[in-house]
Amino acid sequence: MKSTSVGIREIARAFQVAIVALIGATSAAASYRIESLYSDQGGSIQYIELRENSPDGHVTPLAGSTITVRHGAVVRRFVIPNDPPAAFPPGGSLIVTNVADWQSDDSSFAPPRPPDYVMPKFFLPAEGGTIDLDGQDSWDFDPLPTDGSTALLRSGLTVAAQARSFALGTFLVHSDYTGVVEYYNASLGHYFITGSEPDFDAIESGRIKGWERTGYSVGGFSVPIPSHCCSTGGLVGVPVCRFYIPPALGDSHFFSAFAEECDEVAAKFPSYELETRTAFYAYLPDRETGACPVPLRPVYRLWNQRPDTNHRYIYDNLPMRIPMLQAGWIPEGRGPAGVAWCI
């Protein structure tokens, strides 16, 4: 009976400790508010802004707290590894981002600096979802702006992506370049390009199987007039439409920078699904010759001429085009070389 009594007291003490720990964790989560979210189009830069707002003016511990995001059946969790530094002030902001080293906007010569916390790549679903901190402060957020310079506030408003961070200070994010990456499916013999975070996430997480990066990309923009990337001689980019070709005809995708061609494809092939009018932005070649204005370079479109229709988009004229032509692919675009758009 004595040993049983001691065991009961130990269990009771352990239960009390667990309750105290649970209350502490709940209090920690409740005293931090998710203020804003950001993602560029490709998801290469994302951040979550947390604001400390404990009512007693003392910074609440954060180590061990879990940020959870959900989109459909996909659930991701990030455990915050440590508390804010001792100098972190009450009411301050912290940044959780997928960029390990930030370069200051005001000086390209300044060394990169680490942010407050680093989360996994493609952590935020750009198409919208739910986010919470330890089950508290849940936020059902809409699709994130993908123009590269706009963040989503907790209120639902969109504003310039200017965030506050203890490690980085106040900083402005602008990312209007989109890496349009090429994938290859060996079992299908198909190529696919995308500059979209949901595609990157689905392929590279393994939810969509069979696709591997080729190491090749063509580039694009998330806005018609990029301001932080390249000199385009005052030219204005145009949206590139994207169609999904159903399995019976190829289980593939088609892209065009010409609005009239997008309309023609929609009319001629009603079974094709217009997924978006603006997959990314690029520049138009001459409609007759396919020539690109200086200083831009052509992206060529090649078609496999098979019942399972597939296209490949490449900007290098000879080393990659010649083997494709020898394998039976034909130019399909503007001018004799088949230019799809310019970059």
Image (cartoon, rainbow, N blue to C red):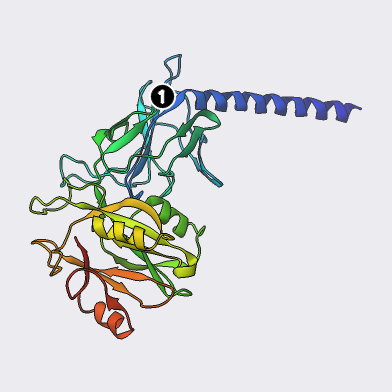
Residue 343 image position (x, y, % from top left): 19, 60
Q: Secondary structure at mark 1?
A: strand
**Relative depth, front residue between 196 and 246:** 246
Work out whether 98 lies above or below 288. Answer: above
Q: Residue, x 23% and y 45% (percent of image)? A: 103
Work out whether 247 lies above or below 169. Answer: below
Residue 133 image position (x, y, % from top left): 50, 32
**Relative depth, front residue between 318 and 236:** 236
Residue 319 occupies quadrant: bottom left
> What amino acid is at disc 1?
Glu
Work out whether 42 lies above or below 291. Answer: above
The residue that mark 1 highlights is 52
Residue 29 image position (x, y, % from top left): 51, 27
Q: Is residue 274 left or right of residue 285?
A: right
Task: Give the quarter of the figure containing the N terminus.
Answer: top right
Q: Residue, x 69% and y 24% (percent of image)? A: 16
Q: Residue, x 13% and y 70% (percent of image)? A: 289
Q: Residue, x 35% and y 24% (percent of image)? A: 92
